[in-house]
């Protein structure tokens, strides 16, 4: 089903309907491998969580602790993804929107309003607002950013066990010098995004003996 709510209609809400509000964020737009992961969180005002912040400014240990606390205390939360195949087929922006939409649709409780980190909105059947730097400004978006980041980091750790030569446990799929060098030597693994330029170049180049 395609919803026709326009970006302008959703971009700036002048009223705040009473009811549940969900925060949404993603992790993994920039890496060269793996899915893009999105999370949606509806927090419980009666169970506040101290220390929520943009996942990028938190240590890995702190994110893991908050991940467990969010899962335990939030009214509901949902984690979804768009696969490497979907990223290559649609492009990373559209795949991100797809993952965000799936995360919202996966919530056990339906929100009356959705707050999304950034300046783009997925197609939704509820009022939504895009908030630039929302992961640092809105607690529910911060919580979503933590769930998405921890989920994707755990996925990268598992991928490292399968393909240790690329170093996924360290760089989490980003195009570091180590990762690019491994691509030149070993070529791409099945989880690399073929539509991303460094991966496409690695596929065209002969693999080193």
Image (cartoon, rainbow, N blue to C red):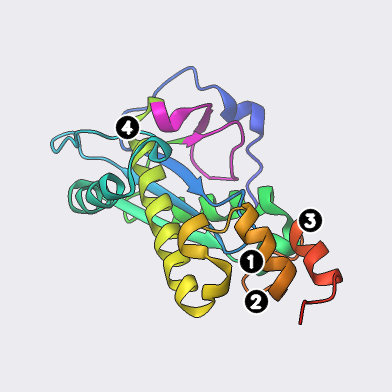
Q: Position of residue 131 (x, y in %)?
A: 51, 27
In three-dimensional space, the C-alpha distance between marks 3 and 1, rounded to whole angstroms, equals 14 Å
Q: Secondary structure at mark 4?
A: helix
Give the residue displayed 59% in from the left and 54% down from the top.
Answer: 98
- The tally of labels here is 4
Q: Can residue 196 be seen from the camera position used here?
A: no
Q: Nearer the viewer, mark 3 or mark 1?
A: 3
Q: Nearer the viewer, mark 1 or mark 4?
A: 1
Determine contact: label 1, label 2, CB under 8 Å. yes
What's the mark number on residue 190? 2
The residue tagged 4 is 139
Badge 3 crowding class, 10 Å Cα cut-off, few under 14, some 14 to 19, many 20 or more, is few
What's the mark number on residue 197? 3
Q: Which residues are magenta?
A: 116-136
Q: Mark 3 or 1 closer to N-term?
A: 1
> Height in image: 131 above or below 101?
above
Q: Mark 1 or 2 closer to N-term?
A: 1
> In the shown orientation, is residue 104 left or right of residue 207?
left
Give the residue displayed 36% in from the left and 51% down from the top.
Answer: 147
Determine contact: label 3, label 2, CB under 8 Å. no
Q: Position of residue 46 (x, y in %)?
A: 13, 35
Badge 2 crowding class, 10 Å Cα cut-off, few under 14, some 14 to 19, many 20 or more, is few
The residue tagged 1 is 84
């Amino acid at each position: 089903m395609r919803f026709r709510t326009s970006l302008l209609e959703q971009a700036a809400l002048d009223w705040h309907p009473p009811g549940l509000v969900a925060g949404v964020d993603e992790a993994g737009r920039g890496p060269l491998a793996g899915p893009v992961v999105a999370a949606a969180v509806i927090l419980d005002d009666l169970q506040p969580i101290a220390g929520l912040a943009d996942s990028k400014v938190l240590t890995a240990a702190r994110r893991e602790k908050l991940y467990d606390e969010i899962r335990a205390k939030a009214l509901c939360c949902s984690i979804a993804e768009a696969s490497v195949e979907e990223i290559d087929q649609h492009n990373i922006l559209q795949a991100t929107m797809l993952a965000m939409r799936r995360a919202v649709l996966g919530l056990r409780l339906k929100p009356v309003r959705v707050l999304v980190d950034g300046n783009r909105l997925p197609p939704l059947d509820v009022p939504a607002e895009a908030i630039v730097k929302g992961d640092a400004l809105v607690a529910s978006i911060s919580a979503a950013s933590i769930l998405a980041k921890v989920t994707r980091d755990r996925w990268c750790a598992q991928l490292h066990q399968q393909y240790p030569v690329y170093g996924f446990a360290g760089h989490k799929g980003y195009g570091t010098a180590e990762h690019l060098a491994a691509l030149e030597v070993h070529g791409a693994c099945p989880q690399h995004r073929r539509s991303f330029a460094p991966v496409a170049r690695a596929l065209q180049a002969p693999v080193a003996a």
